[in-house]
Amino acid sequence: MKRFKIKNLLKSPVVGSEVLVKGWVRTKRGNKNIVFIALNDGSTINNIQVVVDAAAFDENLLKDITTGACVAVKGKLVESQGQGQHVEINASEIELYGKSDAETYPLQKKGHSMEFLRENAHLRFRTNTFGAVFRIRHAMAFAIHKYFNDKGFYYLHTPIITGSDCEGAGEMFHVTTLDLKKIPMNETGSVDFRTDFYGKETHLTVSGQLEGELGALSLGEIYTFGPTFRAENSNTPRHLSEFWMIEPEMAFYELEDNMDLAEEFVKYLIKYALENCMEDLEFLNNMIDKGLLERLNFVLNNSFVRMTYTEAVKILTTADRKWEYAVGWGRDLQAEHERYLVEEHFKRPVILTDYPRDIKAFYMKQNADGKTVRAMDVLFPGIGEIIGGSQREEDYDKLLSRIKEMKMPEKDLWWYIDTRRFGSAPHSGFGLGFERLILFVTGMSNIRDVIPFPRTPKNAEF
Ligand code: ATP
Ligand code: MN
């Protein structure tokens, strides 16, 4: 007999038919005559109620059906007599796949703290909240590929192990096969990487952008969607040391086109979630964040404010506010500043452009003023920066002088610089942090709760 997924069974129930379902017991209640089991198989936030006539089953079997146990149930689908569901299954056969020790199963009672569930990340998918979060995470990943595929962008797989530091921020994890107890040194007292696996110093990538640009300057429009790694010691609710990033890179796009794409893209994703994940969103709206649905609709239906960094600094310096971090032209904006602009001043998403060149990466296109670059950061309510991007410097001389000024390792970047020698073109791109997007779409407040197994300083469990 074919197994039904509970989602499909509930969507179009054929009352009176014989069905087979398999899943994990969420709750069991009842008395010595009749037992009610709420069964969930992960396909939907909803459980199916299984009604068991206790007299018809082995007493020991029923005893073993406790919260967390895995069972297969055959029976007739009938209209429910009780409240809360339209249909239920009158069990005729139950097979116990896996018992769950009632004493030690961590998810017994309702209302565990997020910290507790993080420590039990191997089981937290079985809660309503995390089931919803990870179904939505899947839907967003799918929608990202669909969006770009429909627009004719190519999915480009950029390397995870690299020999260059894209951002120049020095927040990289080393990749090595050297024996850490016997590190070979050269005459100058630094590590001799010649005997290392790649014969040179290598790291985990912090961004696929530089390689993405190579793709865009041949294939036209590409995007990457992969893991990135940053050894930044920032213990915040918005930073992970391993996170996923989506990085579109487009030939012939200027900064305005880049902003248009970013805005259209995130709105598409929000719309996709509203159209495809409503049951999970409604649950999160009720249980996690009462303003979630309203905020999603608001962002979808309003255009993003676009203004320069310089104008934003003016707003911030005249704001009636005590800042933890000082504001001033030339300083990077902190989350408190970004969130003030979005949540209090404009009350809608904001795209800031034309940042001071000294706080941005070497590859951004320089403006004629000699002070700013064609950068753009997209700022979201509750999150702060969700996207960082720019128009790239396509001019060979300007790029090279910036690389020299910033003391970037010119010889490691020869392949990148080459693209400005052979058919350079205006081009732009941005990076969307996947987990920051999921934070926004689910209303969760800690980035550790929107990735299955978070990696943060001093934490690499599971
Ligand atoms: P922040 O100032 O918040 O640290 P950033 O300026 O370092 O961000 P970028 O280098 O522009 O970020 O990376 C592009 C996007 O990747 C960011 O807009 C954000 O969505 C995401 N991102 C960056 N760092 C992290 C991180 N440590 N964990 C999760 N997402 C991140
Ligand atoms: Mn950062």
Image (cartoon, rainbow, N blue to C red):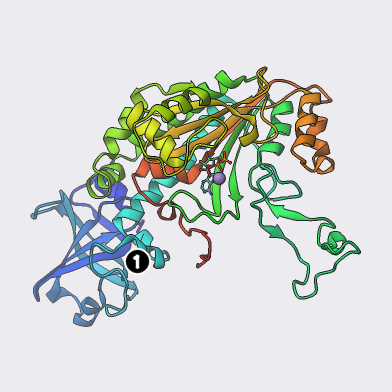
- Report if residue 139 is visible in the image: no
Residue 216, quarter of the rendered image: top right
Residue 357: where, in percent of width, then height? Answer: 64, 30
Residue 402, quarter of the rendered image: top right
Q: Cβ of disc 1 within 8 Å of ligand 1?
A: no
Residue 182 in the figure: left or right of residue 122:
right
- Mark 1 lies on a secondary structure that is helix
Where in the image, quadrant-wise, is ligand 1 located?
Answer: top right
Residue 266: where, in percent of width, then height? Answer: 45, 31
Extreme-bottom residue of the structure: 60
Frontmost residue, 192 versus 179: 192
Amino acid type of the residue that numbered disc 1 sits on in the rendered structure: Phe
Residue 167 in the figure: left or right of residue 63:
right
Q: Name the residue under label 1.
A: 116
At x 80% / y 30%, what residue is drawn? 400
Residue 164: where, in percent of width, then height? Answer: 74, 46
State the quadrant of the N terminus: bottom left
Frontmost residue, 343 versus 452: 343
Residue 101: where, in percent of width, then height? Answer: 31, 79
At x 73% / y 24%, what residue is drawn? 394
- Report if residue 57 is visible in the image: yes
Establish if 177 lies above or below 327.
below
